[in-house]
Amino acid sequence: MADITHPSPSSVDTPFLALDPVRLDRNIARLQARMDALGVVLRPHLKTAKSADVARRLYVGGTGPTTVSTLKEAEYFAEAGFRDLLYAVGIAPDKLPRVLALRERGVDLCIILDSVEQAQAVVAASRTSGRPLPAMIEIDVDGHRGGLVPDNSAILEIAGILHRGAELRGVLTHAGESYGCRSEEALVAAAENERAKTVAAAERIRAAGLPCPVVSVGSTPTSHFARDLAGVTEVRAGVYMFFDLVMAGIGVCAVDDIAATVVATVIGHRREKGWILVDAGWMAMSRDRGTARQPVDQGYGLVAAMDGTLFEDLLMVEASQEHGTLAIRPGSAARLPELPVGTRVRIYPNHACATAAQYDRYHVLETGSDRIAATWPRIQGW
Amino acid sequence: MADITHPSPSSVDTPFLALDPVRLDRNIARLQARMDALGVVLRPHLKTAKSADVARRLYVGGTGPTTVSTLKEAEYFAEAGFRDLLYAVGIAPDKLPRVLALRERGVDLCIILDSVEQAQAVVAASRTSGRPLPAMIEIDVDGHRGGLVPDNSAILEIAGILHRGAELRGVLTHAGESYGCRSEEALVAAAENERAKTVAAAERIRAAGLPCPVVSVGSTPTSHFARDLAGVTEVRAGVYMFFDLVMAGIGVCAVDDIAATVVATVIGHRREKGWILVDAGWMAMSRDRGTARQPVDQGYGLVAAMDGTLFEDLLMVEASQEHGTLAIRPGSAARLPELPVGTRVRIYPNHACATAAQYDRYHVLETGSDRIAATWPRIQGW
């Protein structure tokens, strides 16, 4: 997939999305080592990367279990050879034909749900297709969005429906509220809460005489802070491959771990206002302002030189569609750097999932240089 | 371009971007009639639509002057037959080869700038190519982002450089602060401020014995509230074709004028929390929360039935990547509607430019029905 030209970054027009493969591999190895030590399977979520080239870095010379957020991702990764897929968004019944079509091609695509109506639709689809469709029950451990709380009696009702008419594969949760944690203690507690409640739901199902082979938990914060995963069979996480300023703000990574940055060019100055204008706005960064809810608001991103070295307290403070305004953080004594028109900078994003979504490819940097070693395509849409 | 199948909307998986051609044409006609009455050329900005099919609705049976926000848009619209293009983001010198390549193909692509360095780069490119490259000087009328204030002496210096070594096409501004207006009086004043300051800059250039044929102003709010455009030769606006909740909040349009909505499917309920979950999250809506700064915060969007009728006070209050949470507006006495799993809804977005950017096509609705008459491709990226 990778092309073999090695252009200088200046031969690619800005804005573009630069990916540092050294940091990517380091982030991948870090979580894999944790999961290996804790004795659970890692099922990486590919919603951030949406790239087969990135996905292949996850498994030594092969493919492995993956999570996806859309059926387009499922179809794309199936085509690229990934055969063990979990579509981790509650199933809409009218998407079942696409799920069945992938399963007909020998892909083990599992779905999730949290209602009797969805379970009945899965049973009907299993009957029509003549093959039991595997599904997991979504558990709510922290009130974040969907799922059933572990003592909700609907869990056993749904488990029974799936067991009789489809395939009851297990239970699944996502500790989405862990993004709001502000200390290691809180992260460790969120991970234990996620584990304990999901395992409790699995044990209720088993106590009712029903199978529950898979117990799947995960979020990037909890996966990095779980101290014990007893009863859990697999962990899901996605943004950890790239990391971002939101994850750095939570304390899951350092800014220096961030693997994906946006390259932009200086197109103007408003010296009397202390502004530098670049050709990357919210279209290039996304509108994600995730750090605005954190103790340190990073604007639309932190600004670095092309070698990745941060300029002191230089942020993208405002963004229009194709313009970004760089300025020194309010209250800082740092001085605005001299960046003449035409200078290229790298911007560390708030939220890698949202920023990467704006691009149809990665420009992969050469190790130890700002030259481009390859372009890796990525998918967009549904 | 349009395909000729007429599928039911249920044959397209959600989320998708629905475009109502009746509202589109009505919005286009409204601003065109205003500009015709005021005697100025309308140069629509295609950064919102990014679609040749939409662009062709702007001109009766032909093409006309257009504005673009990226060189990819310039190349795409040139390919589709649009030959009079203004790239309205300050030029990065290393993009000049792409500009020259389009001009070599007979496309009248004009660029903008606001510094001596950029003007010198344009002169150098004009000399190299043997053809004077047209450029406009960006004027700042309200402190929004780039540009030179009308009495900045750099305007005359740049004008002289361009006139001697390239082509001085005129002056241009964008009254970006008009998005913050909260009354008709303020909008009228913003439009007059935009006009007066830009015309003043043009007259300074002319008083110095230099040409300034084009005086270009524009924003969707000011273009709809300008009462007089004396001295202005053209007006630019983009989001008016689709409109959105931000524009409705400013008072430029009604919610019922919004032409582009996101279709989503109900995938779950948290009745004890008053939540309905849909399969459209921030990936489908964008992270744009433009109404958060307005008197009425519309969350991630207002929710309607498939016929476009709004549910009373039902908003998308929260969004994950592929999940949206619908709930009644805080403080409202409205009741959560019964929307079973599988129900489709339409969501009016905060910011049409950002929402449309998430899609590679429009699903165009049939007049007076929720059936799909055509798909229109749109471009993404740079």
Image: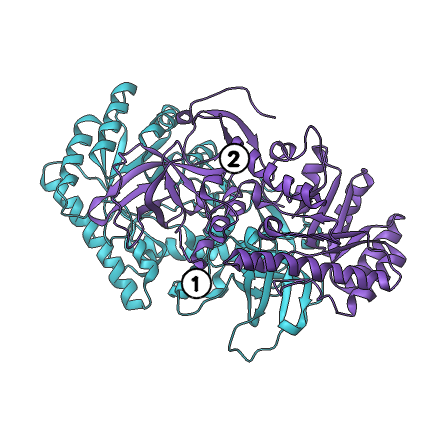
Chain colours: A cyan, B purple
Q: Position of residue B87 (x, y in %)?
A: 70, 48
Q: Nearer the viewer, residue B93 or B50?
A: B50
Image marks 2 and 1: residues in contact by CB distance under 8 Å: no
Q: Quadrant of the N terminus of chain B?
A: top right
Q: Position of residue A316 (x, y in %)?
A: 55, 64
- The amino acid at mark 2 is Arg
Which residue does the numbered mark 1 point to in the structure image?
A291
Which numbered tag is attached to residue B287?
A: none
Chain bearing mark 1: A
Query: Where, by quadrant of the figure, is residue B314 drawn?
Result: top left
- The amino acid at mark 1 is Thr
Q: Is residue A123 left or right of residue B79?
A: left
Q: Nearer the viewer, residue B218 or A346?
A: B218
Chain bearing mark 2: B
On the same chain, marks 2 and 1? The answer is: no
Q: CA distance from mark 2 to mark 1?
A: 37 Å
Which residue does the numbered mark 2 point to in the structure image?
B23
